[in-house]
Image: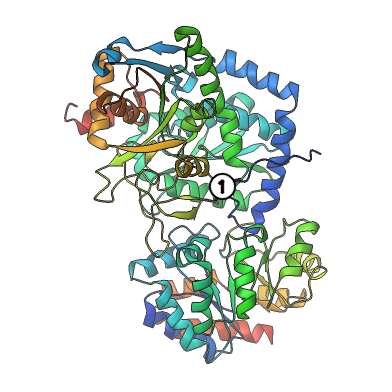
């Protein structure tokens, strides 16, 4: 038994707004994580998998041609080169190992873009765990390659037909499964959202991105970046990145949310940038898109991974404290950056980080050194993008 | 203790169903406020909530149903945390008070998060009815039991609301809960047949909450108020 406790609140945000049935499981999870992260064997096992199986550390790449366009030096942290093609595997591997440690052999996951679903299915194949992935029917349509990958990896993909049939409903359905099967199942949440202790566990598992990037850029440039930029769906790649720089007062932290069809019309996925009121969704209190009555709004984004009306509670805290700022980039602009990055750098980014790239290329800034988290690669988006651009 | 989705199929329709419940001899009505993302609910109550929201149900409209019904029998409101927060804790409790509501259940507000609502409800004389689950540890049950006002809502099975055919052994969870509280203990979640209701009463439940089974009746029958009344009569008979 440890007497420590993980952080449950980030200022006003966070907490544990879940049915009583889950409260003992959250306490068990917190206990298990505290003991696992203090256990050198667990640390070593995860570190080995991250290195030899997943491919960490991922490279830091000086994107010379993007830099030329922006008029300042841009580095990309290459999470797109991680096994399975996105940062999601960092979290999925860690939590799957934790599930084994807790004696839970059935894994529940939700997925939007399919990257977290693929990462969870991959970790489950590796560790011989049963895997059930909830995915909105609309996301199943627009992220077909990932649905096929999950099938091949032995996971069961359950379509969710409720609401807008995207990430919000998939998370709700995953939580309902967990409430029902909490005895033998672990829920691997895919982002830095959900009831405590999830936001901290996911941050702990994603902070390798920022820790590595900080060391790499110091080595290359002999100084810290002036700005660190990451896309924000629930906020896991961004918090993983920000965590390493949050105490470096001179480094600006910028989270880029999905502007969808524009903040004015309300069809977007940018609760932080749009000043969404605090509310409770999926077990925690954070900035949300909601009606005056407290009904959660449907988000909209061309990228399934950012199509979420909520946000991680730590991001809401960083926003209010002024330590980080959150901006939005629209669908069309993200699509343009997707193509531009392919043409200029020979890198096809996922649509999610394409939002961050667009911001850096197009917003004027005095910065001379930017670090962007390239959270994933765009193979999954190819068909959808070509279709939207009328090129298929 | 029948559950009703406030505003399903619309506000008048739900008022008619509520009157049917009262006519059939219900002891109390548990009145649900529809919410976009009801984590504790299974597919039946979810879909009734979706219809109610599409038909324009709001917290104030549901409180209108409560105001009318509370003249006939006690009304307990069931609302998710974000509905409460959106109104503001104190205004929410004020509105409940003026609608004659006797108690409130917030299924996603465990004791750790309920301090403000507890204090506000307490000073207004409204019972904040907590939930206990089969997974709750004895330590938690002791805290939940000591905070319970009105009654303690015991969740019969781990899971969401929804009909369950099999008859669970209710005795164990009821005995554990009762050991930790002085208020009456009601049992709910999954109780969908009169035999299950009487088994729950035999196992020591002071009240039995019937949710999804009744909501399904309202979803499926052409005359929901009459059909639900008949069904509540059957449950009431089994519990007599
Ligand atoms: C490549 C990629 N980046 C970013 C995200 C957004 O998630 P988060 O904000 O948790 O990093 C996703 C989600 O699916 C993704 O696949």
Q: Height in image: A166 above or below A49? A: below
Count of numbered circles on the image: 1
- Which residue was labeled with disc 1? A11
Residue A90, percent from left and from top: 55, 26
Residue shown at 80%/57% (left/top)? Answer: B139
Residue B229 visible in this rendered orientation of the protein:
no
**In the picture provided, is A252 more to the left or to the right than B232?**
left
**Mark 1 element type:** loop
Q: Ligand 1 appears in which quadrant?
A: top left
The one nearer the camera, B177 or B213, is B177
Residue A263, percent from left and from top: 27, 46
Residue B77 visible in this rendered orientation of the protein:
yes
Residue shown at 56%/47% (left/top)? Answer: A11
Instruction: Report which quarter residue A106 is drawn in.
Output: top right
Residue A165, percent from left and from top: 37, 48
Residue A120, percent from left and from top: 54, 31
Quarter of the picture containing the C terminus of chain A is top left
Residue shown at 38%/38% (left/top)? Answer: A326
The one nearer the camera, A77 or A97, is A77
* Label 1 CB-ligand 1 distance < 8 A: no
Quarter of the picture containing the N terminus of chain A is top right
Residue shown at 24%/32% (left/top)? Answer: A333
- Seen from this angle, which residue lies furthest left? A390
**In the picture provided, is A168 more to the left or to the right than A6?**
left
Instruction: Report which quarter residue A221 is drawn in.
Output: top left
Here the colouring is rainbow
The one nearer the camera, B43 or B38, is B38
Callout 1: chain: A
Instruction: Report which quarter residue A75 is drawn in.
Output: top left
Q: Residues within 10 Å of mark 1 (few under 14, many from 20)?
A: few
């Amino acid at each position: 038994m440890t007497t420590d406790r993980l952080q449950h609140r980030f200022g006003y945000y966070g907490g544990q707004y879940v049915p009583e049935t889950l409260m003992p499981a959250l306490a068990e999870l917190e206990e298990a994580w505290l003991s696992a992260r203090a256990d050198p064997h667990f640390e070593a096992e995860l570190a080995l998998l991250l290195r030899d199986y997943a491919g960490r550390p991922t490279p830091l790449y000086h994107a010379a041609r993007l830099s030329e366009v922006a008029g300042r030096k841009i580095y990309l942290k290459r999470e797109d080169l991680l096994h399975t093609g996105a940062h999601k595997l960092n979290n999925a591997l860690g939590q799957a190992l934790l599930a084994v440690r807790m004696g839970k052999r059935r894994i529940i996951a939700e997925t939007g873009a399919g990257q977290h679903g693929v990462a969870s299915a991959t970790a489950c194949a590796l560790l011989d765990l049963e895997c059930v992935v909830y995915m909105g029917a609309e996301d199943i349509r627009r992220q077909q390659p990932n649905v096929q990958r999950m099938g091949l990896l032995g996971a069961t993909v359950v379509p969710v037909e409720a609401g807008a049939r995207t990430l919000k409903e998939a998370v709700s359905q995953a939580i309902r499964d967990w409430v029902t099967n909490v005895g033998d199942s672990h829920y691997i949440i895919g982002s830095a959202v959900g009831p405590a202790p999830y936001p901290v566990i996911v941050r702990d598992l994603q902070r390798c991105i920022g820790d590595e990037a900080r060391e790499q850029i110091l080595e290359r440039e002999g100084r810290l970046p002036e700005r660190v930029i990451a896309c924000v769906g629930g906020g896991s790649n961004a918090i993983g990145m920000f965590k390493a720089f949050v105490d470096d007062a001179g480094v600006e932290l910028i989270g880029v949310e999905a502007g969808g069809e524009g903040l004015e019309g309300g069809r977007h996925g940018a609760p932080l940038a749009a000043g969404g009121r605090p509310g409770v969704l999926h077990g925690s209190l954070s900035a949300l898109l909601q009606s005056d009555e407290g009904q959660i709004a449907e988000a909209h984004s061309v990228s399934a991974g950012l199509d979420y009306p909520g946000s991680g509670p730590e991001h809401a805290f960083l926003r209010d404290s002024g330590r980080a700022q959150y901006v939005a980039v629209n669908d069309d602009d993200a699509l343009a950056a997707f193509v531009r990055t392919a043409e200029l750098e020979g890198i096809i980014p996922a649509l999610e980080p394409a939002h961050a790239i667009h911001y850096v290329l197009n917003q004027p800034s005095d910065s001379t050194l930017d670090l962007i988290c390239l959270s994933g690669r765009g193979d999954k988006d190819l068909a959808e993008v070509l279709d939207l651009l009328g090129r298929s | 203790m029948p559950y009703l989705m406030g505003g399903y199929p619309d506000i008048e329709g739900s008022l008619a169903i509520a009157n049917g419940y009262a006519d059939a001899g219900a002891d109390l009505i548990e009145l649900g406020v529809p919410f976009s993302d009801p984590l504790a609910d299974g597919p039946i109550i979810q879909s009734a909530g979706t219809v109610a929201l599409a038909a324009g149900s709001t917290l104030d409209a549901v409180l209108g149903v409560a105001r009318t019904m509370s003249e006939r029998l006690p009304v307990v409101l069931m609302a998710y945390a974000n509905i409460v927060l959106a109104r503001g804790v104190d205004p929410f409790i004020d509105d409940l008070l003026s609608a004659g509501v006797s108690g409130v259940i917030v299924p996603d507000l465990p004791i750790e998060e309920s301090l403000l609502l507890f204090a506000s409800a307490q000073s207004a004389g409204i019972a904040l009815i907590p939930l206990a689950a089969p997974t709750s540890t004895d330590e938690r049950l002791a805290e939940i039991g000591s905070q319970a006002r009105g009654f303690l809502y015991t969740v019969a099975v781990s899971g969401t609301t929804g009909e369950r055919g099999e008859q669970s052994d209710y005795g164990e969870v009821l005995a554990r809960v009762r050991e930790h509280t002085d208020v009456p203990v009601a049992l709910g979640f999954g109780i969908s047949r009169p035999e299950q209701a009487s088994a729950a009463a035999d196992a020591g439940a002071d009240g039995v909450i019937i949710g999804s089974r009744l909501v399904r009746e309202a979803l499926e029958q052409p005359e929901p108020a009459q059909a639900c009344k008949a069904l509540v009569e059957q449950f009431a008979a089994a519990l007599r």
